[in-house]
Amino acid sequence: KSRLSKQMKLFENCKFFILCDDCQDNMTKNELASLIQLCHGSLLNTFPLTTDIDDSILTIVLCYELLPFDNLNQQELFILSRSNGVHFLHPEWILESIVQFSLQPFECYEEKF
């Protein structure tokens, strides 16, 4: 039971914007969103340019391979967002965090740009 209660609140301090269409080709964007909400994560409807005023809240964009950018404006937007503390992670981070019952380090899942 303790594992279940930990898992259910796993993402309570996280806000997510889902930029990718799926996860590992076998989970849709909607299924990924449902999984996040089941673990008490919040979903953002708009691309985050900044993080929450509350430092304990993580703002995460789930994405795959952003390069090459569609245009210079998109690149500037993403760079601004990252410089404001937004994390760009592969969606596998969600699955691995759930499997391990704890938020995993970002390093292995960060999208480079």
Image (spheres, rainbow, N blue to C red):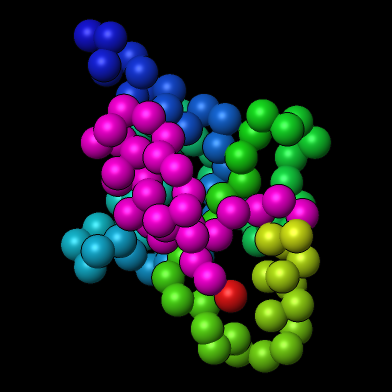
- In the picture, measured across the screen, residue 113 lies left or right of residue 90, that is right
Q: 61 and 43: which one is in front? A: 61
Number of callouts: 0
Q: Is residue 25 left or right of residue 97?
A: left
Spot occupied by residue 74 in the image (x, y as percentages of width and height): 69, 80
Q: Position of residue 72 (x, y in %)?
A: 73, 88
Residue 85 magenta-highlighted: yes
Q: Is residue 62 visible in this depiction of the protein?
A: no
Q: Report whether 60 appears left or right of 101.
A: right
The vertical placement of 48 against 55, above or below, is below
The residue at 42%/28% (across/down) is 10
Report which quarter residue 56 is drawn in: top right
Q: Quadrant of residue 61?
A: bottom right
Above or below for 80 versus 85: below
The answer to whether residue 49 is above or below residue 99 is below
Work out which quarter of the rendered image holds the C terminus and state it: bottom right
Q: Is residue 87 visible?
A: yes
Q: Quadrant of the N terminus?
A: top left
Q: Residue at x 24, y 36 (%)?
A: 99
Q: What segment is highlighted magenta in the picture?
A: 84-112
Q: Residue at x 33, y 14 (%)?
A: 5
Camera-nearest residue between 98 and 8: 98
Residue 73 spot, x, y in % from top left: 75, 83
Magenta stretch holds residue 93:
yes
Farthest front residue in view = 107
Q: Position of residue 78 (x, y in %)?
A: 68, 70
Closest to the observer, 47 or 50 = 50
26 with respect to 76 (left or right): left
Q: Residue furthest top?
A: 1
> Which image quadrant is residue 75 in?
bottom right
